[in-house]
Image (cartoon, grey):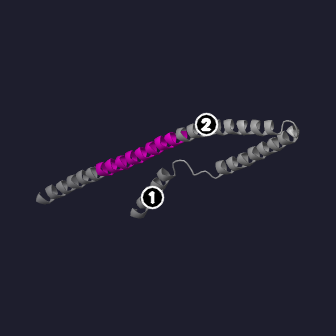
Amino acid sequence: MANSDSSAESATTRSTGLLASLQRLLATSAEVLRTRVEILSTELEEEGVRVRELFFLQQVSLFFLGLGLLLATLFVLLVFWDSHRLSSLAVFAALYLTAGVGTAWVLRRKLRNRPRLFSASVAELRKDRERLASRS
C-alpha cells in the first residue's frame, strides 16, 4: 500500500510541477510579448514625432528659400531690365529647373534607400526566436 500511495503522490507532484512550469512559460511568453509591443509602440511614437518635425522644418525652409529666390530673381531682373532682361530670365529659369530636377532625383533616391520601419522590433523578435530554437 505504501508503494501505491508513493506513486500517486509522485504523479500528483509531476502534474503539479508540469502545470507550474506551463504557467511560468506562459507568464514569461506574455512578458516577452508585452516588452516587444512596448518597443514597437515606442518606435512608432518616435517615428511620428520625427516625421512631424521634419515636415515642419521642410515647410519653413521651403517658404524662406522660395521667398529668397523670388527676391534675388527680381533684383537681378531689375538690374538687367534695360539690357538683358530676357537672357537673365532664361538663366534663372534654367537654374530653377536644374535645381528642381536635382532635388527630385535626391528625393527619389532617399525614398528608395530609407531604413525599414520597426527594424529594432524585428531584430528583437528574431533574437527571441533564435533563443527559443537553441533551447529546444
**Horizontal and vertical percent position of residue 112:** 66, 50
**Residue 127, numbered circle:** 1
**What residue range appears in magenta?**
22-51
The residue lying at 81 percent from left, 41 percent from top is 93
Taking the image as shown, residue 85 lies to the left or right of residue 100, namely: right
Identify the residue at image location x=17%, y=54%: 9
Question: Which residue is at the far left?
Answer: 2
Q: In this view, does 93 lie to the left or right of 131?
A: right
Quadrant assignment for the N terminus: bottom left
**Residue 5 tag number:** none
User: Marks 1 and 2, how far apart in space?
Assistant: 40 Å
The residue nearer to you, when weighing 49 against 30, is: 49
The residue under label 2 is 59
Q: In this view, does 63 lie to the left or right of 38?
A: right
1 and 2 marks in contact (CB < 8 Å): no
Residue drawn at 72 percent across, 39 percent down:
72
In front here: 53 or 128?
Answer: 53
Residue type at the position of mark 2: Gln
Q: Is residue 33 within the magenta segment?
A: yes
Does dot 1 land on a helix, a strand or a loop? helix
